[in-house]
Amino acid sequence: MEFEFPHIYEYQIDSTNRLASDLLSKTNPEHGFLVITDYQTDGKGQYGRFWQSTAGQNILASFIIYPHHIELGQIFRLHLASSLAIVDSLEPYSLPRLRIKWPNDIYSGTRKIAGILIQNNIKAGKIQGSVVGIGINVNQTEFPESLNASSIQLETGKSVSRESLVIKLRQELLKNIQETEEAVWDHLLKRYNELLYLKGISTEFVLFDGSTLQGIIQEVDPSGMIILLDNQQQRREFKFGEIKYLAT
């Protein structure tokens, strides 16, 4: 794959995030630099899970960005900007019911179609640079049932140009990163919550101690905490890592 903006393409590497993180720590790539591959031997998603992908069928990409206006306590803004960038880049393909599953998965209907893994280079309490890893299921048509996954081609019946989608994705990501400044932040957060997967629906979660909780998703707050209403009508707030969905 070739692009007009700065990038590295390798047919196969262990992890785009790993290579991008290495570049970020040792060199000075420009804002928006792309690392992309056709196949990862050790790609990871949330909770260290292996990212399963058929070679040459999907987008496996990492973008290097410099969100200097985002403070350490505002890291959720990177997840929000990345999630909305994926949704907006997928919009032209008319996928059914695109939703954001907190904190950083994208669903079409009830199946996962994309995921995000963000790694930050932090020094002296400031974000020096970030690697935004994005995986999008594009033209793959077979997945293990345990993954609860889908793809653009499965949902629409059409094969899609990965290169065109990557170009659009990068444009939307860089635009959204810029818009996480205070002037339009409220608008982005409102959009995120409008697209929140299972919002208003009673959902079962697992807490960090292994116990379960039934709650109705209300919203995600500006810090990235998910707000639930439990069975006793009590408002509950959880950070990422404190709670996860019982079912994928």
Image (tube, grey):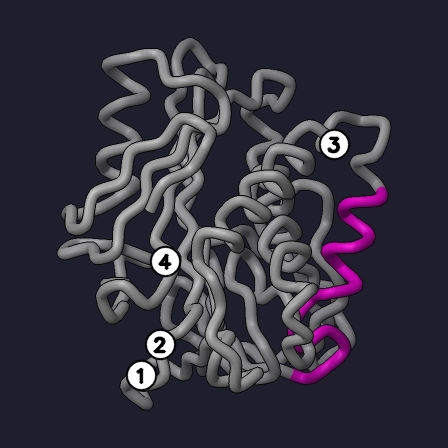
| Residue occupied by mark 2 | 140
| Residue occupied by mark 4 | 46
What residue lies at 52% left-to-right and 55% top-to-bottom? 165
User: Can you tell which of label 1 and label 4 is closer to the viewer?
Assistant: 1
Considering the numbered disc 2 on the image, is that residue within a helix, a strand or a loop?
Answer: loop
Q: Which dot marks residue 179?
A: 3
What amino acid is labelled 1 in the image?
A: Phe
Q: CA distance from mark 2 to mark 3?
A: 32 Å
Q: CA distance from mark 2 to mark 1?
A: 8 Å
First in sequence, mark 4 or 3: give its number: 4
What amino acid is labelled 3 in the image?
A: Glu
Q: CA distance from mark 1 to mark 4?
A: 18 Å
Disc 3 packing (10 Å; few <14; some 14–19; many ≥20): some
What amino acid is labelled 2 in the image?
A: Gln
Disc 1 packing (10 Å; few <14; some 14–19; many ≥20): some
Considering the numbered disc 1 on the image, is that residue within a helix, a strand or a loop?
Answer: loop
Considering the numbered disc 4 on the image, is that residue within a helix, a strand or a loop?
Answer: helix
- Residue 65, compared with residue 118, is above or below; it is above
Residue 189 lies, in percent from the top left, at 76, 47
- Residue 8, compared with residue 201, is above or below; it is above
Say whether residue 78 is visible.
yes
First in sequence, mark 1 or 3: give its number: 1
Give the extent of the magenta segment. Answer: 187-202
Residue 21 part of the magenta-drawn span: no
